[in-house]
């Protein structure tokens, strides 16, 4: 059974940092991504990575603040979030698939989500 498990969310003050992790079990994937959804808003792409090349893409609002990287095992990715802002508050979900995409529909598996809250 394939599962994606996220961890690392929490409450942090503006300007602080958090690191989210996403670990896949059951199989490996070629691409991982993070999406987020704030209350009353649509789900938004945050970042994506291709495992083999390490190529990444980010939504403009997090460029220079967030970094998506690969873990040592081919089933874990990390989203390092620095200089957090209140507008980063959302439920962050990890997704896995086989294409380099910013669209949620291109990912087959999703984690349960982890809450990130940034206080002002």
Image (cartoon, rainbow, N blue to C red):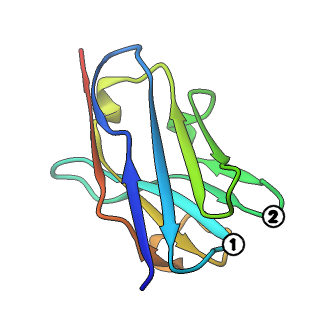
The answer to which of 29 and 60 lies nearer the viewer is: 29
**Does dot 1 land on a helix, a strand or a loop?**
loop
Secondary structure category for the residue under label 2: loop
Q: Earlier in the sequence, mark 1 or mark 2?
A: 1
| Residues under numbered marks 1 and 2 in contact, where contact means CB atoms less than 8 Å apart | yes
Which of these two is toward me, 82 or 37? 82
- Number of marks in the rendered image: 2
Cα distance in 3D space between marks 1 and 2: 7 Å
* Residue 29 x/y as whole percent: 63, 74
Residue found at the very far right of the displayed protein: 53
Residue 114: x percent and y percent? 29, 49
Residue 17, quarter of the rendered image: top left
Q: Residues within 10 Å of mark 1 (few under 14, many from 20)?
A: some
Q: Which residue is mark 1?
A: 30
Above or below, comparing residue 56 to residue 103 in the picture: above
Image point (81%, 64%), residue name = 52
Q: Is residue 99 left or right of residue 92?
A: right
Check disc 2 and report the residue beneath it: 52
Residue at point 60%, 34% (across, down): 63
Question: Farthest left residue?
Answer: 40
Q: Quarter holding the C terminus?
A: top left
Q: Quadrant of the N terminus?
A: bottom left
Residue 76 image-quadrant placement:
bottom right
- Left or right: residue 54 compared with residue 21: right
Q: Residue at x 63, y 28 (%)?
A: 64
Instruction: State which quadrant residue 6 falls in.
Output: bottom left
Residue 88 picture location, percent across and down: 35, 34
Q: Position of residue 85 (x, y in %)?
A: 36, 23
Q: Is residue 82 above or below residue 69?
A: above
């Amino acid at each position: 059974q394939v599962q994606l498990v996220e961890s690392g969310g929490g409450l942090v003050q503006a300007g602080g940092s958090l690191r989210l992790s996403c670990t896949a079990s059951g199989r490996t994937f070629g691409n991982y991504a993070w999406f987020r959804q704030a209350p009353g808003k649509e789900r938004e792409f945050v970042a994506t990575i291709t495992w083999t090349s390490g190529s990444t893409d980010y939504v403009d609002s997090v460029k220079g603040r967030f970094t998506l990287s690969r873990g040592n095992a081919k089933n874990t990715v990390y989203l390092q979030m620095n200089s957090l802002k209140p507008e980063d508050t959302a439920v962050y979900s990890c997704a896995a698939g086989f294409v380099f995409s910013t669209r949620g529909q291109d990912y087959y598996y999703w984690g349960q989500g982890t809450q990130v809250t940034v206080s002002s």
